[in-house]
Image (cartoon, helix red, strand yellow):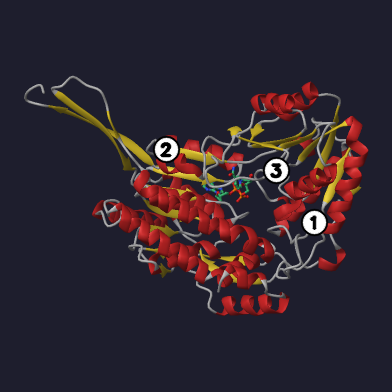
Amino acid sequence: MSLDALRQYDRNRWQAAARAVLKDLRTGLFIDGDYCDAAGGGRIVSINPANGEAVGEFASAGTEDVDRAVRSARKAFLSGTWSRRAPRERMEVMYRWREQIGQHAEELAALETLDMGKPVRDVVAGDLPAVMETIQFMAECIDKIEGSVTSTASDVMHFVMREPLGVVGAISPWNYPMLMGVWKVAPALAAGNCVVLKPAEQAPASCLKLAELFVEAGGPPGVFNVVNGIGEVAGRALALHGDVAKISFTGSTEVGKLMLVYAGQSNMKRVALECGGKSPHIFLADTPDLQRAAAVACSGIYCNMGEMCNAGSRLLVAAEIHDEFVERFAAESRRAYLPGDPLDPATRLGPLVTREAQQRVLGLIDSGRRQGAKVMFGGDTPGQFAAGAYVNPTLFTDVRNDMTIAREEIFGPVASVIRFRDLDEALRLANDTIYGLAAGIWTTDLNKAHRAIRELEAGLVYVNCYDEGDMTQPFGGYKQSGNARDKCFDSVLSYTQQKSAWIRLSEAH
Ligand code: NAD
């Protein structure tokens, strides 16, 4: 089923697709090319956050299962079945994998929506094309990985080559289950590694399917394994494992810090971290096209229910345009972000991922009220969706940058407007955070834009737009947002290590 065909589906069609995937749901671990149960028989139930019903009971890996998956990956790596296979042949497998994903797009989209509540229109328009593009891009990188020959005396030959690391452990979050998995797995595979992926326990279904499709595309068993399970058990066991050469983590800053501890407690494995954010989105008095700016500000925080690492959650707005901006933002929110059934393609705002996430977000909203911020709209749950984990889009004004809602990552549809007087103050407020993932600035003044690009402490800076980019863009943060870069050719190189070969020749030439 092509993505174009899926764009024509109505709600009934998606509900039928959802019923069909639940009938055939595979819930095991995926190790050595096939599904299996957890050795200890552990299971975790994944809940559909739109209605509180169970999606499925998934096997939950223990330490023994993680060890089995790592051993399978290590065996596959040492056999050379993937790591030493001709680049063109590996590229062919990756291209076929991409095709398989396209052919199973209906199933993958339904799974993603059921498991984490993401509006199906976003999966079809955003996540799935991005997953396929990532695999395509990373496959194209395979035969571009090069070494070098350095300048030496003529009786010596010295070359530097890049080799894969071995077994890569990937730990991913639930907010874009497939895409965050593929941002790690695809470059690691492209560089010739074997992978064990631990997806988030809240939404493991689509990642399992991706591994199954990799094998169907001709990927050798053991090269891509998936161990669903609880973070503190399966994730910890993977990050502590002595045969894992690198842990590539996307998730909260708090858990990211644990990865560094686990590496130090075990084999000093490499640690790549993509963590949280509290990104400033700045609107100067000379913002071009305030209507478009307000609409982009809205999608920058309410898209994916605000469950985005680079969400523009702090709206820094110049005093001169503050009232008009807030008015236009509110109108856009009412127009575009009404809560609805995520299986209805008209819906752009589904539930949060779990009841716990909903309660956490409502708690932070309460703290905003208590600390004196003003709720312009939202701040509550939609009564007609009481069975789901919904939170209405919320806008706070009169926010100070030292309030909890301006400091903590809320990871929900909650925006805070902070007023400023001039660019100096805007940049100071923007950088007054422990995070540094993304930042946006709107202005018609090229000099101001350049100054902001230089002074904003963030890995991603957007000018007169927000959350745009393509596969060439290094995606990652400054400060406590992490130390790695996903996407881009450099991400493939980050899954390689350099080997230097120094050859003494018998005579000078
Ligand atoms: P999380 O940190 O709770 O969990 C992430 C992963 O770590 C999950 O697979 C979880 O099971 C695992 N985990 C949890 N505790 C663990 C432990 N003790 N040992 C090993 N593994 C453990 O994050 P989340 O709630 O799934 O995701 C939301 C977070 O992810 C947000 O902070 C968001 O900003 C961040 N994120 C960052 C990026 C980025 O590119 N920078 C992208 C997406 C999400």
In the rendered image, residue 352, in percent from the top left (x then y), is placed at 72, 57
The residue at 80%/23% (across/down) is 425
Mark in front: 1 vs 3: 3
Residue tagged 1: 391
Disc 1 on helix, strand or loop?
A: loop
Mark 2 — residue? 270
Q: According to the image, label 3 marks what residue? A: 466
* Residue drawn 82% across the image and 45% down it: 294
Query: Left or right: where does residue 142 sit relative to residue 16?
Result: left
For label 3, the SS is loop
- From the image, which quarter does the N terminus lie in? bottom right
- Residue 55 image-quadrant placement: bottom right
The number of discs equals 3
Q: Position of residue 218 (x, y in %)?
A: 35, 66
Q: Residue at x 88, y 41 (%)?
A: 325
- Can residue 450 be seen by looking at this rendering? yes
Q: Give the x, y percent position of residue 224.
A: 40, 58
Q: Nearer the viewer, residue 413 or 186?
A: 186
Q: Amino acid at mark 3?
A: Tyr
227 with respect to 376 (left or right) = left
Q: Amino acid at mark 2?
A: Arg
The image quadrant of residue 310 is top right
| Left or right: residue 491 compared with residue 435 | left
Neighbours of disc 3 within 10 Å: few (<14), some (14-19), many (20+): many
